[in-house]
Amino acid sequence: MGASVRNFLLEGLFRKPLTEPAPGASEAAAQELAQAVDRAARRRLGRSLSIRQVDAGSCNGCELEIHALNNAFYDLERLGLHFVASPRHADVLLVTGPVTKNMREALERTYNATPNPKWVVALGDCAFDGGVFADSYAVAGGVSAVVPVDLHIRGCPPTPTQILEGLLALLESQETQPVTVSR
Amino acid sequence: MEQRFMSSRTLVSAQDWQAAARSCAAGDKTLVALWGEIGFVHMALCAPDGSRTELISCACPDGTFPSVARIHTPADRLERAITDLCGLRPDAGHDARAWLDHGRWGVSHPLGARGPAAAQVFYEFLPVQGESLHQIPVGPVHAGIIEPGHFRFTAQGETVVRLEQRLGYVHKGIESLMAGADIARGAQIAARISGDSTVAYGWAFASAVEHALRLDVPPRARYLRALMAEMERVANHLGDIGAICNDGAFALMLAHCGVLRERVLRTAAACFGHRMMQGCIVPGGVATGLDAQGTAAIRGLVKEIGEAFPDLIDLYDNTASLQDRTVGTGALRPDLAARFGAGGVVGRASGRAVDVRRTPGYAPYESLKFEVPVRAEGDVNARVWVRILEVEQSLSLIGQILDALPAGKIRVDVPPVKKECEGFAVIEGFRGDVFVWLRIGADGTILRCHPRDPSWFQWPLLENVIKDNIVADFPLCNKSFNCSYSGHDL
Ligand code: SF4
């Protein structure tokens, strides 16, 4: 019983691509975008892009949508984009939330632990300018108030499609140079 | 009536305040919330079954209040937060360490008489003594895509002897932002207290406003609120079931649950305009209606999940390697769950049969049929099972709501505020009971708002259940609790 159910589910998962059927334009857009990210990532980086996520004070809404990038619809890993556990392995820091004063030092330390070249992507309206929390005594501001930011992805939270669009913009931008830290 | 929470706040003597604390310690009452403001501390308590919520207040003209934590330990962190935020001190607090204030705000007591910043003191973890112990500090930045917090493990070999948490890293000053905000901005902030519970917080905040203003909400709006709340519960439980199994090294469940969760979010976006339905519940009703197309989409969603889910349950139940990780792991004792008033799945998996949709109950749930699944074992497996059974109940509720959806308006205007008033509400979110209390001034601005996340009473229990488990089982225990950092840190 267990084995047959498992076989059924394994087949279900791997035989039929979950990105289809595509009922709406959004799914088609996600698919197209995913392919574009793939091409761009490979062209610029040759192989893959390692992303380290840092919650610097988020409400956790942004994290939920970052998680969604790993589901079978978006399946970020197949594009060579993957999340890593340590900043020392990362090319990109994906930072969410208004930066709280209680997280400021942890963000700075994570940034400093990330080897050059590196990019910082500020994800969500809070990461842009503090969002609804901007005026608080407990908030330092958006991410750029604490570390240099290469790209903002707006939204509250941005949808997985918007996040993919943002990563694409980062990769495609000819102007974007890896951040150099001057000490 | 939308609300059955009509009891009002009573000012009591220090003796009666302590008597209330003793009734919590004796198990005759359950502590719901404890918070402060200049000159006063407030306490919400209810009967052990979740009914008869009452609010009491105690004056503290000299800045001290009779400690509840000394009598009833679940109040410990709440009292430390009161001291950090309001500057009020318990007369005999047994833990004088700051909790939310890490000495970095540039100000002290932001909700009280503000003073210069507290000194950045070295945080002393509790001393541990014994043979061949070692400590493992984890966080605030964790390896996965999760919220920040610090865990200090003391282990003997592989076995955890003690876990001590340090939280407060995502403290955003939400209560200060609420003070002085108008109702519309208050609702925006409430929707962002904990992103996964944006519907529950939106509903609790709106209900508290409506309670304060004695405002009745149209029947259709009540049903749509419940519809959104059940969709939120299904989405989160699916995410949690998948994530727990993934931490048990069984990624297949995560893949399948992730697909179903995504379907819920896409349906929510198509029907209500936001994947997590953020901002869809507003004081006075709901912001967006539901048309025939939306109804059909949600019925299709229920059908799809209803068809896929039994196979997933079989898969969970028949995967021995997974059961080996979840059965008997991280067991929470029922007496502790009751003493801490642990809400949600954490409480119900340890025999605490409390669900505020049922008792005290609120519209439209009294017109709907549903069960409140309870298990006694309290382990990771029990918490998975309660989630599974709750998904089934929520799918049934969604069907019933669509069948019975009344016609009519979805929103009434919030009338102008004429005099100072107070209100509160308790709403069953996916994580447990979300409590919101507020006071609105005569000019319509919020004077004070206190949202209390169920995590306040669950986090300390996580410290308890990991004891004597191996370090490698912590992610499993942690995920099966899935406490909120943002909702707790505020
Ligand atoms: S942008 Fe929105 S979802 Fe993201 S952390 Fe801020 S409030 Fe939460």
Image (tube, helix red, strand yellow):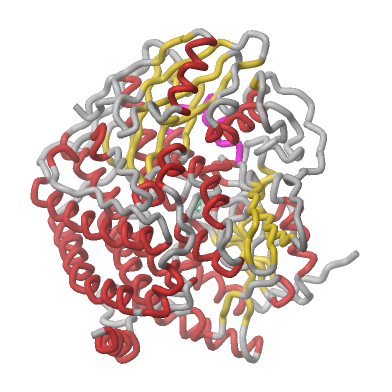
Tell me the quarter of the picture where residue A48 sits: bottom right
Residue at 34% x, 18% y: name it.
B416
In this rendering, position of residue A53 left or right of residue B321: right
Is residue B198 visible in the rendered image? The answer is no
User: Is residue B134 shown above or below A36?
Assistant: above
Query: Where's residue B362, x and y in %?
Result: 23, 34
> Residue reaching furthest front?
B131
- The stretch of residues the image draws in magenta is B172-185
User: Is residue A32 shown above or below B416?
Assistant: below
> Residue reaching furthest right?
A183
In this rendering, position of residue A113 left or right of residue B373: right
Query: Where's residue B231, x and y in %?
Result: 28, 55
Image quarter where the C terminus of chain B lies is top right
How many labels, in total?
0
Residue at 28% x, 74% y: name it.
B312
Image quarter where the N terminus of chain B lies is top left
Residue at 31% x, 69% y: name it.
B260
Residue at 26% x, 75% y: name it.
B314
Query: Where's residue A25, x and y in %?
Result: 31, 73
Within the magenta stretch, is there residue B3? no
User: Is residue A66 shown above or below B57?
Assistant: below
Depth check: give the residue in front, B172 or B348: B348
Depth check: give the residue in front, B455 or B229: B455
Is residue B274 visible in the rendered image? The answer is yes
Within the magenta stretch, is there residue B174? yes
Query: Where's residue B250, x and y in %?
Result: 43, 78
